[in-house]
Amino acid sequence: MRSDFFTQYANDATPRAVQRKETRASQKERDRIQAQQDAEAILSKAARAADRAWREKTIAECEDPAAMESIIGWLKRTGPDDGEAIVETVTQAAGLFKGSDARRMILQAVDKASCRIRRKLGLRELDDPLPPETNVFFECQEILR
């Protein structure tokens, strides 16, 4: 309510010529920002499409595409207590990840899952442990080498 009063007062007290100049300048700025956002949206859409195509191609090249999709789907639903289960699953399914693209994709899925879990716990996403310690991502990375 208060902001409406102050806005109305500012509009009444500001001369019309000044309001028109501000409007033209702000319209140019809005147009520039909109054009920039449109260009970014086009690039983002193209990047997502390329990423989706790469993912589909990589999954199709796996020995068992259905198993690969189910592992990635399961990783999206993991929680804070599933660290050992993630390592165990990657160990058991290591044969599916023959190509470097498949290993990269499963490591990305493990990384996303661990970042999501860390966010839920209120921790920093990229808080890597010091060398004697380890985390799920590094264990999975070692298994897939």
Image (cartoon, grey):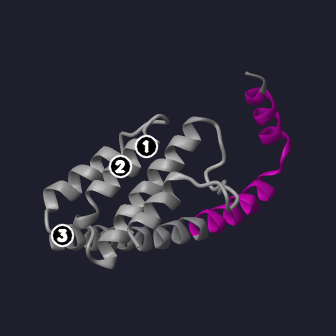
Residue at 64% x, 54% y is: 133
Q: Secondary structure at mark 1?
A: helix
Specify the amino acid type for callout 1: Glu
Circles 2 and 1, Cβ within 8 Å, touching? The answer is yes
Marks 2/3: CA–CA distance: 19 Å
Query: Of residues 34 and 120, which is closer to you in this image?
Result: 120
**Viewer-nearest of labels 2 and 3?**
2
| In this rendering, position of residue 66 left or right of residue 114 | left
Marks 3/1: CA–CA distance: 24 Å
| Placement of 121 over or under 141, stated as above or below | above
Check disc 3 and report the residue beneath it.
62
**Which residues fall within the magenta stretch?**
3-31
Residue at 66% x, 66% y is: 29
Q: Residue furthest front?
A: 132
Q: Main secondary structure of the magenta part?
A: helix
Q: Residue furthest bottom?
A: 100
For residue 6: magenta? yes
Query: Of residues 21 and 113, which is closer to you in this image?
Result: 113
Check disc 1 and report the residue beneath it.
84
Check disc 2 and report the residue beneath it.
88
| Placement of 88 over or under 22, stated as above or below | above
Residue at 67% x, 64% y is: 24
Specify the amino acid type for callout 2: Glu
Quadrant location of the C terminus? bottom left
Q: Position of residue 115 (x, y in %)?
A: 53, 50
| In this rendering, position of residue 94 left or right of residue 60 | right
